[in-house]
Image (cartoon, grey):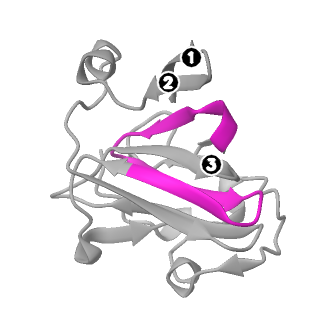
């Protein structure tokens, strides 16, 4: 689900808030977040993901772009979901101030569309390296049309070793 930031125009710019517990609750979204961090990617067509944090501490993520643009992808990894293995994608850009809500049970990844892109993540639980899991970004079973095709400029080593959908042992029902 994409979330549009509440904003207003000022005489010399604009004002916005990225989070309001009242607004998020009205949309039945997580209202409690414990961590926010940002990461910067130098190269256009850098691919990250597809990541998720497993039980017992799954995370809700809210993703936005501070600088640049990304092609953002989520994959349903809830085993008994009618949309298991299907993905949704949206482009996020710094200028549009749109955010993507990623609930537990979805793997998340993206491809940068511009150099020097900065992505901000708000999380409902702390990152725990021992609980990090993933799904192979280029698994043909997912049918994701990445903007970089099969030849990204850069993929982190950790993201090269994730299983495909057929091998994934998802903890999410």
Establish if 18 lies above or below 52: above
Residue 105: within the magenta?
Answer: yes
Q: Is residue 108 visible?
A: no
Most extreme residue toward the front, as rendered? 12
Q: Answer with left or right where residue 56 lies relative to residue 147.
A: left
Q: How many residues crowd around disc 3 within 10 Å: few (fewer than 14), some, or many (20 or more)? A: many
Residue 20 coordinates in the image, percent (x, y): 30, 24
Relative image position of residue 6 (x, y in whole percent): 47, 19
Residues shaded magenta: 94-121
Mark sitting earlier along the chain (3/1)? 1
- Which mark is drawn over residue 15? 2
Q: Which residue is mark 1?
A: 10
| Residue shown at the point (74%, 73%) measured from the top left | 43
Instruction: State which mark lies toward you, 3 or 1.
Output: 1
Secondary structure mainly formed by the magenta segment: strand
Any part of residue 22 in sight: yes
The numbered mark, 1 or 2, whose residue comes first in the sequence reads: 1
């Amino acid at each position: 689900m994409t979330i549009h930031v509440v904003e207003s125009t000022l005489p010399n710019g604009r004002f916005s808030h990225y989070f309001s517990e009242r607004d998020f609750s009205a949309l039945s979204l997580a209202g409690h977040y414990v961590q926010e961090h940002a990461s910067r990617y130098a190269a256009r067509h850098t691919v990250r993901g597809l990541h998720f944090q497993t039980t017992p501490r799954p995370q809700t993520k809210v993703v936005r772009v501070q600088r640049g643009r990304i092609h953002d992808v989520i994959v349903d990894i809830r085993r008994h979901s009618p949309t298991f293995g299907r993905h949704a994608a949206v482009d996020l850009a710094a200028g549009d101030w749109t955010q993507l809500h990623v609930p537990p049970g979805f793997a998340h990844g993206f491809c940068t569309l511009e150099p020097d892109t900065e992505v901000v993540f708000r999380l409902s639980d702390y990152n725990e390296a021992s609980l990090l899991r993933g799904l192979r970004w280029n698994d043909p079973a997912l049918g994701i049309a990445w903007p970089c095709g099969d030849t990204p400029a850069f993929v982190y080593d950790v993201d090269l070793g994730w299983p495909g959908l057929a091998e994934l042992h998802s903890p999410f029902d």
